[in-house]
């Protein structure tokens, strides 16, 4: 991946991950550093889970969902984004610290720095200790907030003298949808007729993506506030969250498609950014989901609002959006039906068009 950081006045800064194939398709010579303003930082990234780690649902290991190992050329970059395996730091997900895991990541971080590479660490990248999944269902339970904060505290304490950039959760919206709606990502929870896999063992596609997102935001805010309180003044680091996004454009110039495009932005992007920036979910999302949607208390809203220094964006392509409000008439709905839109990917259009 190419990782770019852009300083902005409104968002503090934005981290953008653009798929490498975009550069390859459009030509590596299409871009030079002079095409980017001062403040952009180029780097590479990988995840512990996709690079062979084990966490929730060992059946996912070595499957088609694993992705690719990052090649050695990434050391040519001056910044590297990588993730930690929760179970490698805290045994059984909570409680005792794993000294071997700490040693491994201490050595990795020190090695990166010795080559002049600044590590950017992600705390959660699709992985969760299986014991927490077995004990209380992982992210579907509010108990995860306390355990995630404890895990983050261990990482901040052990590595923050060298790590300045912390991402709490990678592609949080994709994790919630793939893991708890369609079921094609770990932990593979879903319910009929929405799951795209045949072996969804448990779950509710109608409710769990929203519940998981609620707990992710609470967990992120808890970890971020902990960092601000205990570590930032001493270490001067930065903490944020990463989401996946398309750039949405109306399929036609009709009013209905334009409204649908905005609704898609509210569901896929505002679902996370609105609470982080304003302290609550978008109104259209709350309206369409109705009683299935969890709500923040006033203290929770204040805790989440502004609990970030940067927003990470994993961006691959744009989507044309077509009105499909007929999906809202169904009595049993999931996230995708709740949006009331149809997404259409046009292959021959620019994959890297983006506006921030």
Image (spheres, rainbow, N blue to C red):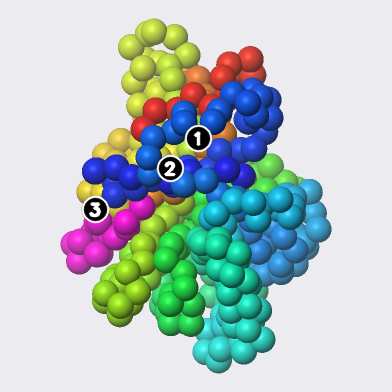
The reply to whether discs 1 and 2 touch (Cβ–Cβ < 8 Å) is: yes
Viewer-side residue, 300 vs 225: 225
Please give the residue where the numbered disc 3 appears in the rendered image.
279
Q: Which of these two is toward me, 168 or 292?
A: 168
Q: Earlier in the sequence, mark 1 or mark 3?
A: 1
Q: Residue furthest top?
A: 253
Q: Is residue 298 left or right of residue 196?
A: left
Point out which mark residue 209 bears.
none
State the residue at coordinates (54%, 31%). Answer: 32
* The residue stretch that appears in magenta: 293-310
Please tell me how crowded label 1 is: few (under 14), some (14-19), or many (20+) other residues with Cα within 10 Å: few
Q: Does 86 sit above or below residue 177?
A: below
Which mark, residue 33? 1
Q: Residue furthest right?
A: 62
Residue at image position (37%, 40%) is: 38
Numbered disc in front, either 2 or 3: 2
Position in image of residue 125 (x %, y %): 57, 60
C-alpha gap between disc 1 and disc 3: 37 Å
- Counting residues from the start of the chain, the first of labels 1 and 2 encountered is 1
Residue 40's tag is 2
Classify 153 as above or below 112. Answer: below
Crowdedness near tag 2: few (<14), some (14–19) or many (≥20) residues, C-alpha within 10 Å:
some
Magenta stretch: includes residue 167: no
Q: Secondary structure at mark 2?
A: loop
């Amino acid at each position: 991946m190419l990782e770019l950081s852009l300083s902005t006045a409104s968002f503090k800064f934005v981290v953008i991950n653009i798929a490498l194939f975009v550069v390859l398709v459009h030509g590596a010579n299409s871009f030079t550093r002079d095409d980017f303003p001062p403040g952009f930082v180029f780097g590479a990234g990988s995840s512990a889970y996709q690079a062979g780690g084990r966490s929730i649902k060992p059946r996912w290991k070595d499957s088609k969902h694993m992705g690719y190992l990052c090649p050695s050329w990434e050391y040519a970059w001056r910044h590297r984004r990588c993730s930690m395996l929760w179970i490698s730091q805290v045994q059984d997900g909570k409680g005792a610290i794993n000294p071997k895991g700490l040693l491994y990541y201490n050595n990795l971080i020190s090695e990166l720095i010795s080559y002049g590479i600044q590590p950017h660490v992600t705390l959660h990248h699709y992985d969760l200790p299986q014991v927490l999944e077995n004990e209380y269902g992982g992210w579907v339970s509010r108990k995860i907030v306390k355990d995630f904060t404890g895990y983050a505290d261990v990482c901040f304490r052990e590595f923050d003298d060298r790590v300045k950039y912390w991402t709490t959760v990678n592609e949080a919206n994709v994790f919630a949808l793939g893991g708890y709606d369609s079921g094609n990502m770990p932990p593979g929870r879903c319910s009929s007729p929405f799951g795209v896999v045949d072996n969804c063992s448990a779950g509710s596609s109608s409710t769990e993506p929203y519940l998981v997102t609620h707990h992710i935001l609470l967990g992120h805010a808890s970890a971020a506030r902990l960092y601000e309180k205990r570590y930032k003044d001493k270490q001067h680091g930065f903490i944020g969250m990463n989401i996946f996004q398309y750039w949405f454009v109306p399929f036609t110039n009709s009013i209905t498609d334009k409204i649908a495009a905005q609704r898609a932005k509210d569901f896929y992007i505002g679902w996370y950014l609105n609470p982080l920036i304003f302290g609550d979910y978008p109104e259209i999302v709350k309206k369409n989901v109705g009683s299935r949607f969890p709500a923040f208390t006033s203290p929770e809203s204040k805790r989440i609002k502004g609990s970030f220094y940067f927003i990470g964006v994993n961006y691959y392509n744009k989507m044309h959006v077509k009105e499909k409000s007929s999906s809202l008439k169904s009595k049993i709905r999931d996230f995708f039906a709740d949006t009331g839109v149809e997404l259409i990917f046009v292959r021959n259009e620019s994959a890297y068009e983006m506006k921030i």
